[in-house]
Amino acid sequence: MKNDRVKLAYLVSHPIQYQAPLLRRIAQEPDIDLTAFFCSDFSVRGYKDEGFGVSVEWDVPLLDGYKHEFLPRIRDGHSIRFATPLSYGIFSRLQRGNFDALWVHGYSTANALQGIAAAKMLGIPTLVRAEPWLSDRPRSKPTLLAKEAFFFGIRPLIDAVLPIGTWNAAYWQHYFGTSVPQFLVPYAVDNQYFQRRTAAAAPQRDTLRAELGLDPSRPVILFASKLIGRKRCPDLLEAYVRLSPTPGQEPHPYLLIVGDGEERAMLEARAKQTGFSSIRFLGFRNQSELPRFFDLCSVFVLPSVNEPWGLIVNEAMNAGRAVVVSDDMGCQPDLVTNGVEGRVFPAGNIDALADALRNIFATPQTAMEMGGNALRKMNGWSFEQDVRGLRQALAAVTGKISA
């Protein structure tokens, strides 16, 4: 296998805060010449997030450190649908750039399919990375039959897939069998960034406690996500109420809810009904602010259903914090073993969620030990594993670089 520089095109809907640092890391590889092609710039311009229900401007760099280009657009918007955004020009860009491989994020949009078809016509190998797993949401029998037909048709256009974890790998195995090779490129975050930011927040922990009016002798349960149905924050609120030692008495831990969305008013009304002053709603916080709250908490909870992955769990684990997750989250089998990095409970089971929290607070050492295990898990689930898997895929489909 000869050592040449491989020209890699990456096609994705828009600049994504979780992906930008990975693209910067890949661009550092001396034998990978990466160019990202974006179909929209709405995340750079600022937009109203449908889930958070607030205007969002990310405070982390989305475009620094790697080559990129915005494709011309026919239609644009502030969210991703099959035909929105709709761009053109990927065929000419791939042809003019003499690319050796195309990496597409997703497969279910017009832009992604356009890119896959263009690469096939130009004889460029295509890699696909996407989030789904087989039970990530209910699907009717006609939908499942349509998916089977779709993947049967698209299979000859795909040279390799890049699974993000165990359940995603099973998804590709189900639809492609052994005809399309797999190379693990795990769903990771910028571990160094979150570990560094959490360490920097630690000396200011007492300041944040004082700002929020928290008693330092009481532990903190943290939820941080969109306040929408599938995130199941109401389940956490009800489980928290069940931690009360006697009716009407506040649980010993605080509950901090970071985020915004359509359920916020309902959640605040329910919290008011409890009469507890220990429940705090802190609104949307940008990505750079979150490590302060990870550092403050003893346990992070995300009780989602139909969750493709849950990258914020990676972030909390990078802070060395125990996590509680449902068994309906894509990250669960890879990141959280029940009783090791935290607790896993059956999605929607509020009593089981309350029991998981009781278990973590059973001794002062339990959460700390689980948090240490969580941090060790993250150190082996990183961008370095992503680069390794991507290199293996590129070596297999181009023969230009070593794995």
Image (spheres, rainbow, N blue to C red):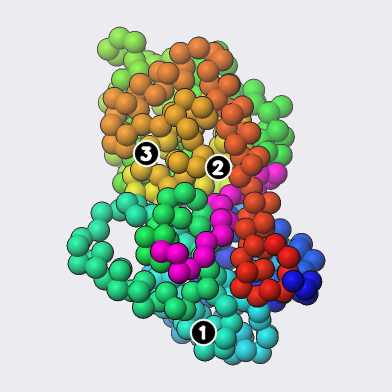
Q: Quadrant of residue 184?
A: bottom right
Give the residue pinned by disc 3: 327
In the rendered structure, find residue 362 and report the number of the disc placed on it. none
User: With respect to residue 316, does 25 lie above or below?
Assistant: below
Q: Is residue 357 magenta?
A: no
Q: Is residue 186 magenta?
A: yes
Could you tell me residue 172's position as x and y percent?
42, 61
Which part of the image, by quadrant, shows the C terminus? bottom right
Which residue is at 34% across, 10% downward?
A: 245
Where are the magenta residues, as a range? 177-194
Q: Secondary structure at mark 3?
A: loop
Of label 2 and label 3, which has the lower sequence position?
Answer: 2
1 or 2: mark nearer the eye:
1
Find the residue positioned furthest to the left: 141
Of 319 and 130, the residue lying toward us = 130
Q: Secondary structure at mark 1?
A: helix
